[in-house]
Image: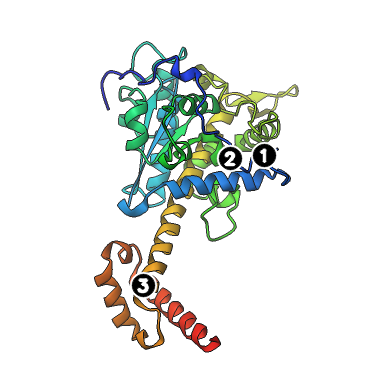
Amino acid sequence: KNAKMRPFIAPLTTTLLYHATTVVDAFSPGSNDTPFSLSAYQKARAKQTSNSMDASRFHFQILFVDNTNFHARIAEGMMARIAEYNDALFTLFPYSATIESSDNAPMDSCAPEEALTICDYLGLCSTTCSEDGTSFNLQNDLDQYDLIIAVDDEIQNLILRSLPPTTTEDDGYEHKCRSLSEFLSVNFCGVENSEELTQQMIQDMIEPGMWEKARPYYDAAKALFDSKSSSGDDEGRSRGDIFSESKSTDVYNPRMVLTENGAAIPNQSGWPLVEAAMLVACAGITRFCLDTFDAQFDEAFAQLLGTHFYRLDQIISVDDADDQLRLGSLSVTGYFSPKERHARIVRHFEELRSKFEIE
C-alpha cells in the first residue's frame, strides 16, 4: 500500500452525473408486470456478480471501499481471518481503500486509533490494520480487483455514478461493485451454493472465538438490517443501511449496559451491532466467493466431459478417462481431487448411457 493516499480519480462534477445504465435491472419494482420479489431481485443481482468474476486464476482480489479510512480496513482484517479459518488464505485476498475526495475522509492516511483498538479486540492482523491507507482509484481499481465492496450504499452509488458515460454493461463494472450490506442476505451470498444456504452456515464460517464476541449483538443487528431493507423507496432502494450512520468514534460505545434493575445486558445499539453485522457480511462474501469458484469449475469440468465423451463408443475406464481429461486441461481438472473427478466421470458416463438408451 502507498504511504500517502492517491487522489480519487473522478472529477467531482462527474460524481453528480448518473450513469446511463441503471443500477437496478428488470427485477426492479414496477419495471414490468411481474410482482416484485426481494429474494428474486437479490439472487438476480448476485448471479450477475458471480458471472462477472473469473475463477480461472484460482484467486479473487476483493477491495473494501469507505470514506473514513476506518471501516474498510476493519472489514479487510475480518475477511482475512475468515478466509484463513476456511482454508482460503491463498485464494481470497482482501484489501481496503478510501475515497479521499469525500468530506468524511481524514486529512492523512494514518490508521486511526479506533481501528487499532478494534483490531486488537478481535485479534485481527495488527500489521495490516496499522498500515497507512490507500486512496480508491476509479480508473485502476475497477479493473484490478475482482470484487469492489462499498462499505455502505452511499459509497456504492458514488462509485457507480462516477463511471465514464461510455461504460457499457459488457464492461461488468456495475456487477462487480456491491454494497457490504448485500452480503447479509442468504439470498445474495448463497446464489451459487449447491445447498439451501442458511444464516447458521454462514456463522459457522467465523472462528468460534471471534463469533462469541459478536454473537450477543447480532440478533439486534439483523433486526436493524431487516427494518432498513424493508423501508425502501419507490425504486426499490433501501433508505440507508446498518453501516451508513456508523462513525469511528462509535467504537467507544459500551458493549454492556445496565437495565433499570441494575442487570448487565448486551448493548442493543451503536458499534457492537455494526461490528457483528460486518463480521457476518464478511463471512457472506467469503461464502459467495468460494461458491463462485465451485460453480465455475463445476461448469468447466462438465463442459470438458462433454467435449471428450459424447458417444457411447467413447466410454472407457474411469482411470483412462481421467488421464485423458488431465491431458486436456490441467487447470480445470486440478481443481478437483481424484475422487471428485472419478465421481463426476462415472456420473457423466451413466447419463450418457441413459441418453442413448432413451433415444
Judged from the image, the secondary structure of the residue bearing numbered disc 3 is: helix
Residue 335 vs 231, above or below: the answer is below
| Quarter placement of the N terminus | top left
- The relative height of residue 344 versus residue 9 in the rendered view (above or below) is below
Which residue, given by chain and number where applicable, does mark 1 sit on? 31
* Label pair 1/3, CB-CB below 8 angstroms: no
Judge whether 146 appears above or below 233 on screen. below
**Image coords of residue 146 (percent x, y):** 38, 41
**Residue 14 position in % (x across, y down):** 44, 19
Mark 3 and mark 2 residues within 8 Å of each other at the beta carbon: no
Q: Quadrant of residue 327?
A: bottom left
- Is there any visible trace of residue 126 in the rendered image? no
- The residues bearing labels 3 and 2 have C-alpha atoms spaced at a distance of 35 Å
Task: Report the number of discs.
Answer: 3
Between discs 1 and 3, the one toward the N terminus:
1
Residue type, numbered disc 3: Thr
- Residue drawn 39% across and 63% down? 300
The amino acid type found where label 1 is placed reads Ser
Q: How crowded is mark 1: few (under 14 residues within 10 Å), some or many (20 or more)?
A: few
* Percent position of residue 332, x then y: 32, 63
Label of residue 353 in the image: none
The answer to whether one can see residue 68 in this image is: yes
CB under 8 Å between callouts 1 and 2? yes
Rendered residue at 60%/29% (across/down): 241
User: Picture coordinates of residue 11 (x, y %)?
Assistant: 39, 16
Q: Which mark is residue 25?
A: 2
Q: Is the residue 137 above or below the residue 230 in the image?
A: above
The disc label shown at residue 307, or none: 3
- Using the numbered discs, state the Cα–Cα distance from disc 1 to disc 3 in whole angstroms: 40 Å
131 or 303: nearer the viewer: 303
